[in-house]
Structures are given as structure tokens and as C-alpha cells.
Image (cartoon, rainbow, N blue to C red):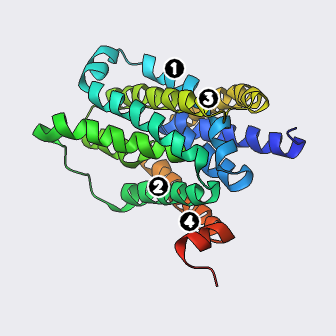
Amino acid sequence: MWSFENLIIITVTFILAGSVKGIIGLGLPSVSLALLTATLGLKDAMAIMLIPTFFTNILQSLVGGHFKFIAKKFATLIIAAFIGTWFAAGILAKSEAALLSGLLGLSICSYAGVSLFTPQIPPPGKHETWLSPIVGAFSGFLTGLTGSFIMPGVIYLQAVGLPRDVLIQAMGVVFTMATLGLAVALGGHELLPKETMMVSAAALVPAFGGMWLGQRIRKRIPEPQFRRVFFIGLLLLGIYIIVRALLREEVRVFLGLAS
């Protein structure tokens, strides 16, 4: 049974995560996973974020009028991401959650660090044909382990050089398929308890409310300024998750750090 305190944490988390997504077009799974993993644990966090992430991404993927172009351009990336996610979730079911939490923290730190300190990554150009499925498979694999598609998937999509409205819709399409693959895989490994999925469905309300709030905020705050604050916060949160994981005895034993 979920406690009242946990339900408050979940509600506030999805209002915040939805607001970030409403402002910059991404961040709902990253923010919700980071905050919920730090409080409830990775496997519960992945299950809870599924329904809000899936439906907000569907909405994002249908807005913009570029769906056919995106589906054709990134078909191999999407298929590879789905397969990679499904495969890795089988490993998740048998793995130590604390260790994978540290991997999530590392992924979040990497994304925030690249976004803050690295100049624009050059577009793949003629290498896109063979690079897309590799990036999709690797990103999908990490999604299956951590619930997050951000590394290197989002960085790659940003490097392709799409116009802003096409990029946001493309992220919605790719995220939707990755989340669908994660849901199928977690369900197949009995990692989606009915009670947890009811909580996940209820989290749609604060998630959509947060998106509406974020879209209103976007009109008032310069996006570059907000993105910088967002990535600094994400970096600090990722570091916290890593440190928290390293304090767990099973992780220290795995890394050979136990005394």
C-alpha cells in the first residue's frame, strides 16, 4: 500500500517533471526517474513513470505535422531502440537495483555535462544511415536498464540538426516507442504490479498539469537561461543518485570498494 507521503512525492515530482517538459520539450522521464529513484528506488520509479511518459510523449509526437518524415528518417533508430529496450529489461529483472540506480545517475550526469560544457556535436551527415541503428540499440539498451533514453539518444537527435519544432516532435516519436518497448518488457517480467500501475495512471493528472504550466512559463522565461538552470540541477541530482548508490553495500562489493 502506498503511503500518503509517497503519493505527495509522486504528485510533486510529476508536476515538476511535466513543467520541464512543457518548457523545453523533454525531461519528464529524466526528472521523474531521478527524483523517484532517489526516494522510492529505481524499479518502482520506472514503473510509475511509464504511463505519464507514454501519454505525454504520444501528445508530443502528434503535434507538428512532421510524423511521416520523422518515422521514415529514424525508422532504423526506432526499431533498434525498441529491441534494445526489450532485451535489456530482461537483465533489469535479474539485476541489483542499487547498481542500476548508479548507472542511471551516471547517464543523467553525462547528459547534463554534455549539454552544459560541450559545444554543438557535429551532425552525423553521411554516417547517419549506419549510425542511427547503433545509437538506437545502445540507447534502448540503457533505457531497458535505467528507464532513461537520454544518452546517447537525445544528444544524437539534437546533433542531426533538425528545426526546433521537428526535433521536439521527433523526440516525442522516439520516446514513445522506447517507452512502449520498456512497458512490454517490464510487463513480460512481471515488474508492473497492478497497484503501482494505478498510481502511474493517476500521475497523468499532475504530469499534464505540469506540462500546461510549463508551456505558460515558456512564454515568460528565456529558454537558454532555463535550460542552463535545468541541466545544472539535473547534474547535481545525478551526482546525488551516484553517491547514494555507492553507499549501498551491494554496490561497494560489486565495485570492490567494500572494506
Mark 1–mark 3 Cα distance, whole angstroms, equals 23 Å
Vertical side of 32 occupied by 240: above or below:
below
Mark 4–mark 1 Cα distance, whole angstroms, equals 31 Å
Q: Nearer the viewer, mark 2 or mark 3?
A: 3
Q: Where is residue 142 in the image (x, y as percent from the top left)?
A: 45, 46
Vertical side of 181 occupied by 225: above or below:
below
N-term-proximal mark, 1 vs 3: 1
Residue drawn at point x = 42 percent, y = 43 percent: 141
Amino acid, disc 4: Ile
Q: Mark 3 points at which residue?
A: 187
Q: Nearer the viewer, mark 4 or mark 1?
A: 4
Q: How crowded is mark 4: few (under 14 residues within 10 Å), some or many (20 or more)?
A: some
Q: Residues within 10 Å of mark 1 (few under 14, many from 20)?
A: few
Q: Name the residue under label 1.
A: 59
Q: Residue furthest bottom?
A: 259
Q: Mark 2 points at which residue?
A: 107
Q: Do the CB atoms of the residues marked 3 and 4 lie less than 8 Å apart?
A: no
Q: Name the residue under label 4.
A: 239
Q: Which residue lies furthest to the left in this view?
A: 126
Label 2 secondary element:
helix
Q: How crowded is mark 3: few (under 14 residues within 10 Å), some or many (20 or more)?
A: some
N-term-proximal mark, 3 vs 4: 3
Residue drawn at point x = 33 percent, y = 38 percent: 136
Mark 4–mark 2 Cα distance, whole angstroms, equals 10 Å
Vertical side of 98 occupied by 139: above or below:
above
Q: Residue furthest front?
A: 94
Label 1 secondary element:
helix
Residue drawn at point x = 56 percent, y = 46 percent: 92
Amino acid, disc 1: Leu
N-term-proximal mark, 4 vs 2: 2
